Image (spheres, grey):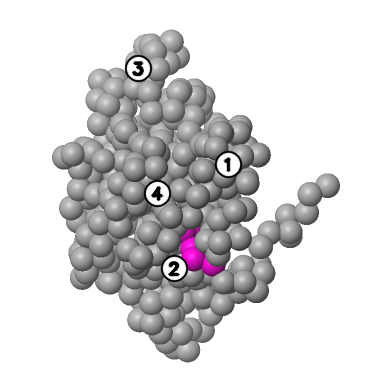
Amino acid sequence: MTSHRQHHIMEGRTGTEVILNGLKYLYFAGTSYFQLHTHPDVVNAAMDATHKYGVGSATTRVMTGTTPLLLKIEDKLAGYFNTEDAVYLPSGYLSSLAGLKALDEMGTYDVIFLDEGSHYSLVEGAIATGRPVIPFRNRDPKDLELKISEHLGSGQRPLVATDGLFPVIAKLAPVRDYLDLAVKHQGVIWIDDAHGVGILGAHGRGTCEALGARSDRIYLGATLSKAFGAYGGIIMGSGSFINKVRSGSVMTGSSSPMNAAVAAAIKGLELVQENPGLRKKLWKNARYLNESLGQLGITSESRFIPEMHGTIPVASFSYGDAANMKSIHNYLMEQGIYIQYTKYKGAGPGGVLRIVVSSSHKKVEIVRLTTALKEAFRLFNS
Ligand SMILES: Cc1ncc(COP(=O)(O)O)c(C=O)c1O
């Protein structure tokens, strides 16, 4: 039996470098797109909040009371996403469960149509509603249309559920097409944009902003554990919808989050909001990585969308079979560089090599990576 304790041990702080099992590597993985998890202001905010308020309140918000930090992050989130209200949840994993249940209680849909590339949390959240869940092919509006015509009864309304940015294949969902189909049938769409928020769109509001998809039929959940350098799930939307989430089982039945996490989130959100240059730097690095990979013959059709504000900071590709990709991964580790070889959801049975760039990477570090990759491709030519 494989033990899940056998992973690498990550020591110290993780930034553009990481220490794995005592050895230092140049790091091109993870999801800290602006490296805010170790930003001194974020760390200090977490420490100050712990000193001031303790670790947590050891009660649920509904039972005794909320905290000033929670009220502040929720106000700030509503401001950042330009929505009427927002709610903070114990983890991003719970956002889809809480959001889909609230929409169900509001009577907005009858059948869920689920992009089959969606994150585990979205699949499980959809099933938990007890509504029929019909999968359709990843990023395929035509298949969605077909599935709606086959499975939606007369008078029924669809909820189309999808990730915004699929993190493993590094592609966006065609949310405008999904929205058109949902609207055509008086339905709604739910987007888990865990990876898009903060990094894409003119204001960093994520995939919908980047693709110009706007509608009160779009419902959005995400996380603070990636671009914003903190921890916790978030849902944004109208006052009545957010109130429904607040009175739902996820919020009623879970302890208030750690004060450190909420304070870190407030600071992380402020840093992202006040420094649009972070996004510009990230897009520039992403573009440079993609161009460099293009010169090595690795291209992707969807990472550059001309009218889109942003470039996806993830490159994902297969190169020969699983054994070949593992050899490339191992060779890079021997050179002191860590990229992922992963079979995470969306990667397909053979897995993919996956490179994540952050706004903090220097050009010379990206050059070191692509130079080593070029040699790896020569050695392990599929
Ligand atoms: C698409 C997606 N949704 C949800 C989550 C869960 O978020 P969290 O880690 O904050 O619980 C993740 C991964 O962490 C994710 O990649």
- Residue 152 vertical placement versus 326 (above, below): above
Q: Nearer the viewer, residue 172 or 288?
A: 288
Q: Furthest-right residue in view? A: 1
What is the magenta range?
A: 25-29
Q: Earlier in the sequence, mark 3 or mark 2?
A: 2
Res. 314 mark = 4
Distance CA(mark 3)–CA(mark 2): 40 Å
Q: Does dot 1 land on a helix, a strand or a loop?
A: loop
Quadrant of res 165 = top left
Q: Where is residue 47 shown, x and y percent of the image?
A: 46, 85
Query: Residue at coordinates 43% horizontally, 80% vertically from top-left?
Result: 43
Q: Which residue is mark 3?
A: 142
Query: Residue at coordinates 39% horizontally, 42% vertically from top-left?
Result: 296
* Membership of 15 in magenta stretch: no
Q: Earlier in the sequence, mark 4 or mark 1?
A: 4
- Residue 372 vertical placement versus 308 (above, below): below
Disc 4 marks which amino acid? Val
Distance CA(mark 2)–CA(mark 1): 26 Å
